[in-house]
Amino acid sequence: MDSRSVGVLLAGGVGQRVGLATPKQLSEVAGKTIIEHSIAVFEDAPEIDEIVVLMTPGYTDRIREIVDKGGYRKVTKIVEGGASRTESTWRALQALGTEECDVLLHDAVRPLVEPRIITECVRALRTHQAVNVAIPSSDTVLVAVPGPGGEVIGEVLDRSRLRRSQTPQCFKLSVIREAYERAFADPDFDSRPATDDCGVVLRYLPEVPIHLVPGSEHNIKITHPADLRIAELLFRLAAEGPTA
């Protein structure tokens, strides 16, 4: 019997880099808030059984309004996010309890995630304990080192092996809980926190391979003001469908 699959939307940010007074996930793009687009993708995914939303403190009532108005029946919990990505993830894991399930942790400000990605992630969790979504790097990546008068190139990385990480990042609940329990037991974790959930697993459960699922160039993270305009265009192109 397959495990239940839970989509966790991490929406704890405050939108400072976008220059907004309210959380960026409440900005409107293509007629809906960003968070509603993300909820809708997981709601419509047949593989997803349940949705948990982590929201910026003080804005959970706004999410309840969106969920009620949109009739999103899979949303079972709306939880206040923490001060950091890792704290928000841990609050989500606590809300899920201890019964084993498949957890898909997704940045709520990636509203253009394709249904195909969700399908492939859920399938991958049938045979893997940890899964990440990634795309090849189209840019050459340099390692900068101190030099005379400023930074100089210390190393040019092999682009064929580089990937740009996206979300969802997906795990068996028992695996990601164990990784976080080990992280919180490490006195050095706060001084050098991981930037994402795969980073926590890689550091504290290095014996668990993290399988890669192909992402999409359209699965952008809305971080800067220009990203709002790019997302608007991508939604418009998606609505128009393929051209002859």
Image: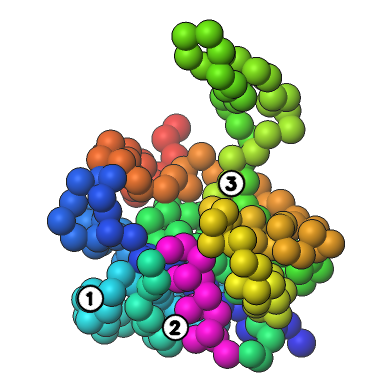
> Residue 165 — which label?
3
Identity, as a three-letter code, of the amino acid under mark 2: Lys
- Tell me the quarter of the image containing the C terminus: top left
Question: What is the span of residues highlighted in magenta in the rendered image?
Answer: 84-97
> Nearer the observer, disc 3 or disc 1?
1
Q: Nearer the viewer, residue 213 or 243?
A: 213
- Neighbor class of circle 3 (other Cα within 10 Å; few <14, some 14-19, many 20+) is some
Which label lies toward us, 2 or 3?
3
Magenta stretch: includes residue 87? yes
Residue 38 placement (x, y as % from top left): 39, 63
Q: Secondary structure at mark 3?
A: strand
Going 38% across and 81% down the picture, which residue do you hit? 79
Vertical comparison of 165 with 46: above or below: above
Reading the image, the residue beneath label 2 is 74
Q: Earlier in the sequence, mark 3 or mark 1?
A: 1
Q: Is residue 31 visible?
A: no
Residue indicated by mark 1: 58
Q: Earlier in the sequence, mark 2 or mark 3?
A: 2
Give the label, 2 or 1, closer to the camera.
1
Between the C-alphas of marks 2 and 3, the distance is 27 Å
Residue 133 in sight:
yes
